[in-house]
Image (tube, rainbow, N blue to C red):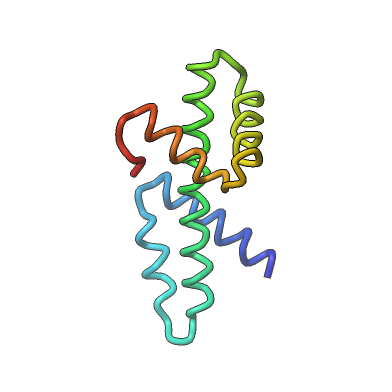
Amino acid sequence: MVTVVIVLLSVAVLLSFHGGAGRLETTMESPGDEQARETATRIREALGDRVLIAHATGVLMETSHVSAEKAYALLVERSEREDIGLRAVADRLVTDATGSAPS
């Protein structure tokens, strides 16, 4: 199972860089492959979360003049202090910085 997830993650990353993320879905349309589709969906969501967290890290690096490691540590610290998920903290930070919700 872990190997399948790693392979799917690798495929999803490669396809997202080449503009073909939709192809991942169409290659898994065979009947009875619901688990694979759900896994692919979770991978796409996780990749989106990583991009959002990286964006928030960049905002903190710019506004606080800190390293990437320190900016990420600040995000984690805020997440723990406010008892909300890291993605939610990143979403709020990016929205506040840009004036619009991340896409």
Q: Position of residue 77 (x, y in %)?
A: 66, 34
Pinpoint residue 38: horizontal percent, then vertical percent: 49, 71
Q: For residue 8, which quarter of the picture?
A: bottom right
In this rendering, position of residue 72 left or right of residue 49: right
Residue pushed farthest top?
Answer: 65
The one nearer the camera, 79 or 21, is 79
Q: Is residue 55 above or below residue 14?
A: above
* Front in this rendered view, residue 81 or 90: 81
Decide: is 45 above or below 99: below
* Residue lying at 42% horizontally and 49% vertically, measured from the top left: 16
Q: How many marks?
A: 0
- Residue appearing at x 34%, y 29% in the figure: 98
| Residue drawn where x is 51% and y is 34% of the image | 54
Residue 5 in the image: above or below residue 79: below
Answer with left or right where residue 9 lies relative to residue 37. Answer: right
User: Residue 34: horizontal and vertical position, in percent?
Assistant: 48, 79
Determine whether, in the image, residue 67 is placed left or right of residue 38: right
Position of the C terminus, as image quadrant, is: top left
Which quarter of the figure is the N terminus placed in?
bottom right
In percent of the image, x 52 and y 45: which residue is there? Answer: 87
Q: Is residue 30 above or below residue 79?
A: below
Q: Nearer the viewer, residue 51 or 93?
A: 93
**Residue found at the very far front of the displayed protein:** 82
